Image (cartoon, grey):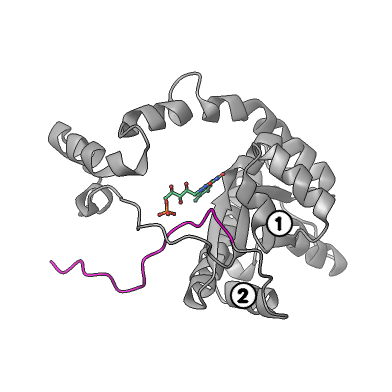
Amino acid sequence: MNADPILAPHRSIRLFSPKPLPDGTLERLVAEAQRAPTDATGQMYSFVRILDRGRRQRIAVLSGEQQHVLDAAEFLVACADTHRLTRVLELHGRAPGDYPATGLHFAVIDATLATQRLIDAAEAIGLGTVCIGGILNGVEELVELLALPRGVLPLFGLCLGWPGEEPVARPRVALASVLHADAYRDLTTAEAAADVAAMAPITRSGDWPAVLARYFAAGGTMEAREPALRRALDRQGFAWR
Ligand SMILES: Cc1cc2nc3c(=O)[nH]c(=O)nc-3n(C[C@H](O)[C@H](O)[C@H](O)COP(=O)(O)O)c2cc1C
């Protein structure tokens, strides 16, 4: 098996130089994002570019005071968006369907594929990026702040700018842990231990399970985010009963 890299390695950047992007660069990157595949021709995503300094500061606070949110030359909020196509349907005399779960499923995929293409294009011209899931901590206020209509849900932020650091590529679990043959195969204990060892350098403590637990264990950040996200899903038309 040849697992030699094909692309230049991706690294999230959290230290940015204050230099702005050349005029038109952001638009070129979004045009690249638009070339991403999209389900059923729907293009179910929108990016909100945050130009206003006060708005950026508020989003930095909502995201847990992350300095790179303030320092990056550009900040986008990537949104799932079934609103725009609903408008097209309505303007053309068609009643929109009722598909909150399916809409969420495909809109998250569309938004993520488009954003990944934007990230790849940004890195290809020497820019650095980091996704900001921290925006979820203030998801309800963000819906208000960005005036998001029903059918639009903020997913994550994206900092974009000139790198002020050159971090080493961060580790990943073994290829065999993510690539299954014909059917899902659970990790063996030995494979799990090897993954934990491989991931140790991504944490200051060297204890990846402790990091996972902070987010995903009972009482962790993910659970804490549930109530507000469920309310936002409901309000934005992505909830079902
Ligand atoms: C959906 C998502 C949300 C993320 N949220 C944050 C965040 O709020 N703050 C941050 O500094 N990095 C964030 N990251 C970046 C990850 O921490 C980073 O991708 C991971 O540690 C692997 O490092 P690498 O991207 O350098 O390979 C996020 C990444 C993704 C995909």
Q: Nearer the viewer, residue 70 or 216?
A: 70
Q: Is residue 3 magenta?
A: yes
> Which quadrant is home to the C terminus?
top right
Q: Does the image show residue 148?
A: no
Q: Residues within 10 Å of mark 2 (few under 14, many from 20)?
A: some
**Could you say where residue 12 lies in the image, as x and y percent from the top left?**
47, 56
The residue type indicated by label 1 comes to Thr
Instruction: Say which residue appears at 35% left-offset and 43% top-offset.
Output: 202
Find disc 1 in the rendering and name its residue. Answer: 82
Task: Read off the magenta span.
Answer: 1-16
Image depth: mark 2 or mark 1 in front: 2
By secondary structure, the bulk of the magenta-drawn segment is best described as loop
Is disc 1's CB within 8 Å of ligand 1?
no
Quadrant the N terminus occupies: bottom left
Q: Residue at x 73, y 80 (%)?
A: 23
Q: For residue 66, what is the image quadrant?
A: top right
The reply to whether the magenta stretch includes residue 167 is: no
Q: Quadrant of residue 77?
A: bottom right
Which structural element holds mark 1?
loop
Which residue is disc 2 drawn over? 29
Number of residue marks: 2
* Disc 1 residue crowd, few under 14, some 14–19, many 20+, Cα 10 Å: many
Relative to the observer, which residue lies in front, 23 or 96? 23
| Percent of width and height locating residue 105 | 56, 50
Q: Amino acid at mark 2?
A: Leu
Q: Position of residue 116 (x, y in %)?
A: 51, 64
The front one of 229 and 237 is: 229
